[in-house]
Amino acid sequence: MDRKIRMSEEFARKSMEDYDSGHDWWHIVRVRNLALYINENEKMADPFTLEITALLHDTADSKFLKGDSENGYKMIGEFLDTAGMTNIRDQVVEVIRNVSFSSENPAINLSDPVLQIIQDADKLDAIGAIGVARAFNYGGFRNNMIYVPGEGKGEKNSSTIGHFYDKLLRLKDMMNTPTGRFLAEERHQFLKKFLEQFYREWDFGTQEIY
Ligand code: ADP
Ligand code: NI
């Protein structure tokens, strides 16, 4: 069991080497810890399957595979076979297909508790202080503006502050588990505090958050 976890850690590290630093190994570690913590409270999922899925959940990201996620899923399946985890292969690959909020794939089996927990853990790591840090890190990686005045409430946002409205501020209402919802609340409040302070500095507080 331990060996399978170590092999999955190694596979995740390797496949994410070229990703941006907001998607680095420590994102995986945080998601694993959050997922296991949620499951300790909720007792919904098999902890081993959950841990393996958490470790592999970002290894087929289309943003970093030139749009070719299918090949990523194939590689995950092959890895699981090689590592002696054929028994959980289909479940793990299916969860990873459905885990991303921005996924173009329609969700197939949303009732899988492993998926519900990984989604919560992944969303929690996108909000709060870490979420703010990751957003600006990603925006810098893409050479996006930190803020474009007027952006926020409208449809098409290009700045990182705009991304708060497109995605981050919506995440707390999309949590699947009670523990996830509880943890999201504090992190959501921090996002709002951050925006308040940001606008206070930007134009002396004349801008409303919403
Ligand atoms: P996931 O971890 O579910 O794959 P994404 O790949 O969409 O999520 O995003 C990874 C991180 O990058 C998150 O913290 C997210 O908020 C941030 N991010 C994604 N798109 C943008 C953007 N346009 N501007 C700023 N941050 C972004
Ligand atoms: Ni992730």
Image: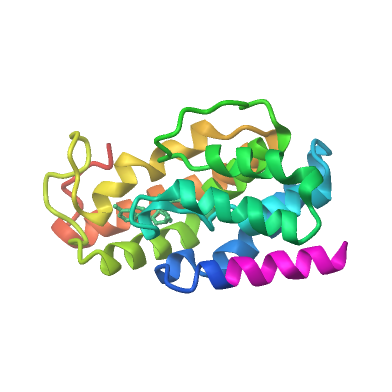
The residue drawn where x is 44% and y is 48% is 69
Predominant SS of the magenta segment: helix
Query: Split into 4 quadrants, where in the image is the N terminus?
Result: bottom right
Q: Position of residue 9 (x, y in %)?
A: 68, 68
Is residue 87 rendered to the left or right of residue 14?
right
Is residue 132 rendered to the left or right of residue 172?
left
Query: Split into 4 quadrants, where in the image is the C terminus?
Result: top left
Q: Is residue 44 depicted above or below 193 in this figure?
A: above
| Residue 127 visible, this orientation | no
**Residue 64 position by quadrant:** bottom left
| Residue 90 visible, this orientation | yes
Which residue in the rendered view is the most extreme toward the right?
1
State the residue in front, 196 or 102: 102
Q: Is residue 133 depicted above or below 153 in this figure?
A: below
Q: Is residue 191 depicted above or below 176 in this figure?
A: below
The residue drawn where x is 19% and y is 34% is 155
The residue drawn where x is 72% and y is 45% is 89
Q: Position of residue 18 (x, y in %)?
A: 42, 72
State the residue in front, 9 or 157: 9
Q: Position of residue 22 (x, y in %)?
A: 44, 66
Q: Which residues are magenta?
A: 1-13
Indicate whether residue 7 is drawn in magenta: yes
Is residue 193 rendered to the left or right of residue 4?
left
The residue drawn where x is 30% and y is 41% is 165
Indicate whether residue 17 is drawn in magenta: no
